[in-house]
Amino acid sequence: MKRLLLLAALLCAAATTRAQMPEIPEPDFIGEVVAVLPDGSTAKLEKETVQMRTRANAGVLIVGIGKAKTKIVIESPAAAVRLDGEQPIRFIVKAVDNNSDPISIINVFRFDATKKRRLAEVASASTFGSVKTNKLERLRFEASKYGERSYLLTLLDKPAGEFGITVSNPNLIDEKQTIVATFAIEGPADEAAEAAEAAE
């Protein structure tokens, strides 16, 4: 009985979310992402072509023992689309189709931002052969089908920072190029820091 009540509540919540969604067309191309803003308008996320960079630590260079890390690098410090972490954050993501489990093909992950670039570690390998992949710091989301070939994502985690979204094609083994749609989440801490900088 409890399971039936829980299922009914989830279906009701999904129906309410869909009722509140304005009629927004799907993005034009696979991998494109639009943010659904609280007022019902949308903002298309910038698509960045990233570099993959592998660097070894000093131990590898000096004695041949250590680790090498592979990172995604974007040569700019901040995303143009900036979202309020105090509000619901939702995206419409265009994929090859919407028959796959979205968790298996969509990654929403954090970048480490510096003054010049954004970086995210994807893998590390030691000289003894151990390799750790899936090092991205991912955000949790709920997803449902949207339109013919898209998903509607609602973020469950909304920490402040710089983030990216990638969409893979489950039908291809090798991706031609990694494209990342980027956005930032701002919160009260960011607003306080900006006010302090403006006052100086």
Image (cartoon, rainbow, N blue to C red):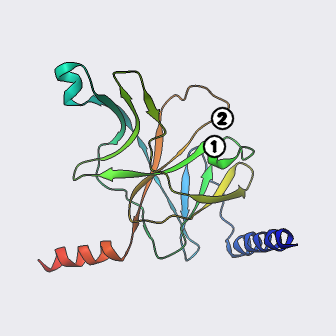
Residue at horizontal 69 percent and vertical 76 percent from the top: 20
Q: Mark 2 points at which residue?
A: 170
* Vertical comparison of 61 with 183: above or below: above
Residue at horizontal 72 percent and vertical 70 percent from the top: 18
* Amino acid tagged 2: Pro
Q: In which quarter of the image is residue 71?
A: top left
Residue 171 coordinates in the image, percent (x, y)? 68, 31
Q: Quadrant of the N terminus?
A: bottom right
**Label pair 1/2, CB-CB below 8 angstroms:** yes
Foreground pick, 21 / 171: 171
Q: Tag 1: Cα neighbours inside 10 Å, few (<14), some, or many (≥20)?
A: few
Q: Name the residue under label 1.
A: 104
Q: In which quarter of the image is residue 163?
A: bottom left
Residue located farthest toward the left when viewing the structure as drawn: 200
Residue located farthest toward the top when viewing the structure as drawn: 64
Give the spatial CA distance, label 1 vs label 2.
8 Å
* Amino acid tagged 1: Ser
Q: Tag 2: Cα neighbours inside 10 Å, few (<14), some, or many (≥20)?
A: some
